[in-house]
Protein backbone atom coordinates (compact mmCIF):
# COMPACT_ATOMS: atom_id res chain seq x y z
CA UNK A 1 0.00 0.00 0.00
CA UNK A 2 2.72 2.48 1.01
CA UNK A 3 5.01 1.68 -1.93
CA UNK A 4 2.22 1.77 -4.53
CA UNK A 5 0.06 4.69 -3.38
CA UNK A 6 1.02 6.51 -0.17
CA UNK A 7 4.66 7.12 -1.07
CA UNK A 8 3.75 9.20 -4.14
CA UNK A 9 1.17 11.24 -2.21
CA UNK A 10 3.74 11.83 0.55
CA UNK A 11 6.36 12.87 -2.04
CA UNK A 12 4.03 15.32 -3.74
CA UNK A 13 2.75 16.98 -0.56
CA UNK A 14 6.16 17.28 1.13
CA UNK A 15 7.99 18.47 -2.00
CA UNK A 16 5.31 21.12 -2.67
CA UNK A 17 5.51 22.39 0.91
CA UNK A 18 9.32 22.38 0.90
CA UNK A 19 9.52 24.18 -2.44
CA UNK A 20 7.13 26.90 -1.28
CA UNK A 21 9.08 27.35 1.98
CA UNK A 22 12.42 27.37 0.17
CA UNK A 23 11.27 29.58 -2.72
CA UNK A 24 12.94 32.77 -1.38
CA UNK A 25 16.23 30.89 -0.97
CA UNK A 26 15.75 29.27 -4.38
CA UNK A 27 15.38 32.70 -6.01
CA UNK A 28 18.39 34.19 -4.17
CA UNK A 29 20.65 31.30 -5.19
CA UNK A 30 19.35 31.47 -8.77
CA UNK A 31 20.24 35.17 -9.03
CA UNK A 32 23.71 34.64 -7.53
CA UNK A 33 24.45 31.72 -9.84
CA UNK A 34 23.09 33.66 -12.83
CA UNK A 35 25.88 36.15 -12.18
CA UNK A 36 28.61 33.66 -11.17
CA UNK A 37 27.84 31.15 -13.95
CA UNK A 38 27.36 33.78 -16.66
CA UNK A 39 23.64 33.33 -17.12
CA UNK A 40 23.47 29.56 -16.50
CA UNK A 41 22.32 28.95 -12.90
CA UNK A 42 20.96 25.45 -13.53
CA UNK A 43 22.53 22.14 -14.47
CA UNK A 44 20.40 19.88 -16.65
CA UNK A 45 21.24 16.27 -17.44
CA UNK A 46 19.37 13.27 -18.79
CA UNK A 47 19.12 10.47 -16.22
CA UNK A 48 17.24 7.14 -16.14
CA UNK A 49 14.35 6.87 -13.72
CA UNK A 50 11.89 4.11 -12.87
CA UNK A 51 12.01 1.29 -15.41
CA UNK A 52 15.02 3.12 -16.92
CA UNK A 53 12.74 5.78 -18.41
CA UNK A 54 14.82 8.84 -19.23
CA UNK A 55 14.04 12.24 -17.73
CA UNK A 56 15.81 15.58 -17.36
CA UNK A 57 17.27 16.12 -13.90
CA UNK A 58 17.74 19.69 -12.67
CA UNK A 59 20.20 20.94 -10.05
CA UNK A 60 21.91 24.20 -9.25
CA UNK A 61 25.09 24.47 -11.28
CA UNK A 62 28.23 24.07 -9.17
CA UNK A 63 30.97 23.81 -11.82
CA UNK A 64 31.92 26.25 -14.56
CA UNK A 65 32.71 25.37 -18.19
CA UNK A 66 36.47 26.08 -18.08
CA UNK A 67 38.40 24.17 -20.78
CA UNK A 68 42.03 23.53 -21.67
CA UNK A 69 43.80 24.57 -24.88
CA UNK A 70 42.35 21.49 -26.63
CA UNK A 71 38.80 22.54 -25.81
CA UNK A 72 38.37 19.74 -23.25
CA UNK A 73 36.67 20.38 -19.92
CA UNK A 74 39.12 20.77 -17.05
CA UNK A 75 38.94 18.23 -14.17
CA UNK A 76 35.97 18.64 -11.84
CA UNK A 77 38.14 19.84 -8.96
CA UNK A 78 39.38 22.76 -11.09
CA UNK A 79 35.90 23.74 -12.30
CA UNK A 80 34.17 23.64 -8.92
CA UNK A 81 33.48 27.25 -7.93
CA UNK A 82 33.52 28.65 -4.38
CA UNK A 83 29.75 29.10 -4.56
CA UNK A 84 29.41 25.60 -5.98
CA UNK A 85 31.50 24.15 -3.17
CA UNK A 86 29.25 25.85 -0.62
CA UNK A 87 26.11 24.57 -2.34
CA UNK A 88 27.45 21.02 -2.35
CA UNK A 89 28.62 21.17 1.24
CA UNK A 90 25.16 22.29 2.36
CA UNK A 91 23.32 20.14 -0.25
CA UNK A 92 21.49 23.28 -1.40
CA UNK A 93 22.36 22.33 -4.99
CA UNK A 94 19.68 19.63 -4.69
CA UNK A 95 16.77 22.07 -4.12
CA UNK A 96 15.70 22.23 -7.81
CA UNK A 97 15.16 18.46 -7.78
CA UNK A 98 12.01 19.12 -5.78
CA UNK A 99 10.59 20.12 -9.17
CA UNK A 100 11.52 16.66 -10.49
CA UNK A 101 9.64 15.12 -7.56
CA UNK A 102 6.59 17.32 -8.16
CA UNK A 103 6.61 16.34 -11.85
CA UNK A 104 6.72 12.66 -10.92
CA UNK A 105 10.19 11.91 -12.32
CA UNK A 106 11.67 11.30 -8.88
CA UNK A 107 10.83 10.49 -5.28
CA UNK A 108 12.19 12.16 -2.17
CA UNK A 109 13.72 8.82 -1.17
CA UNK A 110 15.18 6.24 -3.55
CA UNK A 111 18.36 5.20 -5.37
CA UNK A 112 20.14 8.23 -6.81
CA UNK A 113 19.60 8.61 -10.59
CA UNK A 114 22.90 7.86 -12.34
CA UNK A 115 24.06 8.20 -15.94
CA UNK A 116 22.29 6.53 -18.91
CA UNK A 117 25.64 5.17 -20.10
CA UNK A 118 25.63 2.78 -17.12
CA UNK A 119 22.40 1.04 -18.16
CA UNK A 120 24.01 -1.52 -20.54
CA UNK A 121 26.67 -2.55 -18.01
CA UNK A 122 24.50 -3.17 -14.96
CA UNK A 123 24.20 -6.73 -13.79
CA UNK A 124 20.66 -8.10 -13.47
CA UNK A 125 20.81 -7.46 -9.73
CA UNK A 126 22.18 -3.93 -10.08
CA UNK A 127 19.50 -3.06 -12.63
CA UNK A 128 16.84 -3.65 -9.94
CA UNK A 129 17.61 -0.17 -8.63
CA UNK A 130 15.32 0.97 -11.47
CA UNK A 131 12.34 -0.97 -10.08
CA UNK A 132 11.47 2.17 -8.10
CA UNK A 133 11.67 5.91 -8.74
CA UNK A 134 15.07 7.47 -8.08
CA UNK A 135 15.37 9.78 -5.09
CA UNK A 136 16.97 13.03 -3.96
CA UNK A 137 18.45 11.01 -1.12
CA UNK A 138 18.54 7.31 -0.40
CA UNK A 139 19.84 4.41 1.66
CA UNK A 140 23.24 4.48 -0.08
CA UNK A 141 23.56 8.23 0.54
CA UNK A 142 23.09 7.90 4.31
CA UNK A 143 25.49 4.96 4.38
CA UNK A 144 28.49 6.60 2.79
CA UNK A 145 27.30 8.69 -0.15
CA UNK A 146 30.39 9.23 -2.36
CA UNK A 147 32.83 7.54 0.00
CA UNK A 148 31.72 3.96 -0.66
CA UNK A 149 32.47 1.68 -3.59
CA UNK A 150 30.09 1.16 -6.48
CA UNK A 151 29.40 -2.42 -5.34
CA UNK A 152 28.45 -1.18 -1.86
CA UNK A 153 26.29 1.58 -3.35
CA UNK A 154 24.38 -0.87 -5.57
CA UNK A 155 23.97 -3.32 -2.70
CA UNK A 156 22.38 -0.58 -0.59
CA UNK A 157 20.14 0.47 -3.51
CA UNK A 158 18.82 -3.05 -4.07
CA UNK A 159 18.36 -3.56 -0.33
CA UNK A 160 16.21 -0.43 -0.27
CA UNK A 161 14.13 -1.66 -3.22
CA UNK A 162 13.45 -4.89 -1.31
CA UNK A 163 12.64 -3.18 1.98
CA UNK A 164 10.72 0.02 1.19
CA UNK A 165 8.52 1.16 4.05
CA UNK A 166 7.32 4.38 5.61
CA UNK A 167 9.49 3.86 8.69
CA UNK A 168 12.57 3.24 6.54
CA UNK A 169 11.92 6.42 4.55
CA UNK A 170 11.54 8.41 7.78
CA UNK A 171 14.81 6.96 9.03
CA UNK A 172 16.56 7.96 5.79
CA UNK A 173 15.17 11.50 6.03
CA UNK A 174 16.45 11.81 9.61
CA UNK A 175 19.89 10.44 8.68
CA UNK A 176 20.03 12.71 5.61
CA UNK A 177 19.45 15.79 7.75
CA UNK A 178 22.25 14.65 10.06
CA UNK A 179 24.57 14.05 7.06
CA UNK A 180 23.82 17.51 5.66
CA UNK A 181 24.53 19.18 9.01
CA UNK A 182 27.88 17.38 9.33
CA UNK A 183 28.69 17.62 5.57
CA UNK A 184 29.71 13.96 5.71
CA UNK A 185 30.54 11.90 2.62
CA UNK A 186 30.00 14.65 0.03
CA UNK A 187 33.19 13.99 -1.91
CA UNK A 188 34.80 10.69 -2.80
CA UNK A 189 38.27 9.93 -1.49
CA UNK A 190 40.07 11.21 -4.59
CA UNK A 191 37.61 13.46 -6.44
CA UNK A 192 34.96 16.12 -5.84
CA UNK A 193 32.47 13.77 -7.50
CA UNK A 194 32.11 10.00 -7.54
CA UNK A 195 34.42 8.13 -9.91
CA UNK A 196 32.64 6.79 -12.97
CA UNK A 197 31.21 3.28 -12.77
CA UNK A 198 33.00 0.72 -14.91
CA UNK A 199 31.87 -2.87 -15.34
CA UNK A 200 34.21 -5.27 -13.59
Image (cartoon, rainbow, N blue to C red):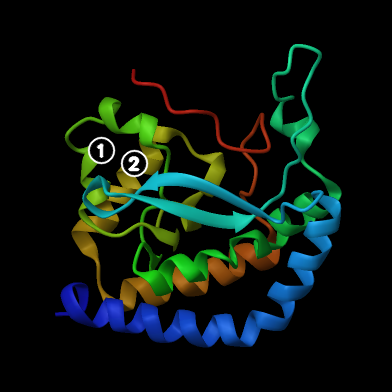
Q: Which mark is residue 126?
A: 1
Q: Position of residue 151 (x, y in %)?
A: 36, 34
Residue at 40 percent of width and 22 percent of height: 198
54 relative to 112 in the view: left or right: left
Q: Looking at the rendering, in which quadrant would you find the N terminus?
A: bottom left
The residue under label 2 is 154
In the image as oriented, which residue stretches furthest toward the front? Answer: 39
- The answer to whether the residues at label 2 and label 1 have Cβ atoms under 8 Å apart is yes
Q: Secondary structure at mark 1?
A: helix
Residue at 63 percent of width and 49 percent of height: 186
Snapshot quadrant of residue 24: bottom right
Q: Looking at the rendering, in which quadrant would you find the C terminus?
A: top left
Q: Would residue 140 be visible to someone looking at this image?
A: yes
Q: Position of residue 49 (x, y in %)?
A: 32, 52
Snapshot quadrant of residue 189: top right
Residue at 82 percent of width and 45 percent of height: 81
* Relative height, residue 115 to residue 163 (above, below): above
Q: Position of residue 39 (x, y in %)?
A: 77, 53
* Relative height, residue 79 to residue 104 (above, below): above
Q: Position of residue 184 (x, y in %)?
A: 64, 54
Q: Which of the two labelled residues, at mark 2 and mark 1, occupies the earlier sequence position?
A: 1
Q: Would residue 137 be visible to someone looking at this image?
A: no
Q: How many marks?
A: 2
Amino acid sequence: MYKKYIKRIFDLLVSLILFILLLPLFLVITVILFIVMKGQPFFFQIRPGKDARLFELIKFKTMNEARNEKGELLPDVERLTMMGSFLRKTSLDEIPQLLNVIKGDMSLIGPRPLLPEYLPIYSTLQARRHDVMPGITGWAQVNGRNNISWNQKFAYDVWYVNNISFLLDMRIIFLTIRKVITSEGINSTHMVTMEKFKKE
